[in-house]
Amino acid sequence: MSNPFPEFKNSQHFLSIVLISSIIVSAVVGGVFGYATVALVSNSNSLAKNNNDQILSQEQSLISVVEKVSPSVVSIVVSQEVKISQNQVFDNFFFNDPFFRQFFVAPEKTEDKIEKRDVSAGTGFFVSEDGLIVTNKHVVETQNSSPTFYSVITSDGSTYDAELLAKDPVIDLAILKINITGVVPLELGDSDGLKPGQTVVAIGNALGRFSNTVSRGVISGLSRSITAQSGIYSEKLNEVIQTDAAINPGNSGGALINLEGKVIGVNTAVAQGAQSIGFAIPINQAKKAINDVKTTGKITYPFLGVNYVMLTPQIKKEQNLSIDHGALIVGDSQTSGVTPSSPAEKAGLKDGDIVLEIDGKKLTEATDLSSNIQSRNIGDLVRIKILRNDRELILEATLSERP
């Protein structure tokens, strides 16, 4: 704040002058100003007390939420059988070096040993009383076909063998199950009504070492589109939640919670080289996968059957197209962009077609073809507006189950 008395350069002098003036004025005017001073002090104390009470109330609310949901959050460890050569260390340090190879005789080869090693770790949370657990698909993905084992560690330290029931073919979700009864599942909230600035809590197995780590933040943004990568795994995720709650490797698959203790997202990714930029899949996207597994034991999606790229002004310019929105159906030198015997082929879609609308809804980068189809049901009849050779056509397709 600027000094209202610029002639007093020293801040100590300034403070002293104001205080003395106040005392003198109060003494001259008498009880009226004296009363006003007391009232101001009283109001100040009251405001401070209300602020402290509010802070304590918010803190207690957060503590209560964490205590409520933590028992339903689990750590997940993925292990694989790995073949270990008994001569591996000797080979690596000696016989791969020509200098050492001339001085030593290689030992006789012994039989390889099989060891079970942890290959990844993540987080999950219960969504049913009989042990169904939601996590990320990239947590349970492995890089080879070796026998794979899944372990779940609950908040009380108990370890259970887990079965992988399903992996979502569209979004980064998987469902595990352990043999347990009577657990308290987390309540699923509504991610459609979220607002930036809303307080959220992330709970997870941070770095694969610190189980049930709690971090607090806010919703930083909504409807983000990202491409997430983990080892060999890469997937584009649309309409995800951005949060500044600390999310680290190992938090994947954990719950993003609101102040009601309800899950509003599944923590999935973090921006590398940045601070406090994490992403979560909205829980409303995950509800379908959860319900599918509960009712049918698998996750199903409707299927149209095209490969495409969403048009942008840059692609419009490069391809010399007449429009800059829609989904351009493209193949490669060996395969068509339209899957054989698919609903798209039966409807008459061809390479080079630009899908403009589905049932009257315009396709853009924000609302692309995939998300539009995913929101529908198997067996739905959809009207597809396309642009073919600068001519608009309407085709109809009946969606089938995704292979």
Image (cartoon, rainbow, N blue to C red):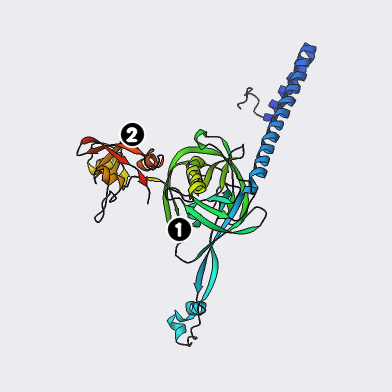
Is residue 261 visible in the rendered image? The answer is yes
Mark 2, secondary structure of its residue: loop
Q: Quadrant of residue 369?
A: top left
Q: Position of residue 186 (x, y in %)?
A: 60, 44
Q: Residue at x 58, y 55 (%)?
A: 178
Horizontal arrangement in the rendering, residue 287 relative to residue 213 (left or right):
left
Q: Which numbered disc flags the more N-terminal residue, 1 or 2?
A: 1
Query: On the image, numbered disc 2 is attached to which residue?
Result: 359
Horizontal arrangement in the rendering, residue 147 relative to residue 313 (left or right):
right
Closest to the observer: 130 or 367? 130
Amino acid on which the number 1 mark rests in the picture: Gly
Closest to the observer: 259 or 348? 348
Q: Residue at x 60, y 52 (%)?
A: 74
Which label is found at residue 397?
none
Label 1: how many Cα within 10 Å (few below 14, some 14–19, many 20+): few
Query: On the image, numbered disc 1 is attached to which residue?
Result: 231
Label 2: how many Cα within 10 Å (few below 14, some 14–19, many 20+): few
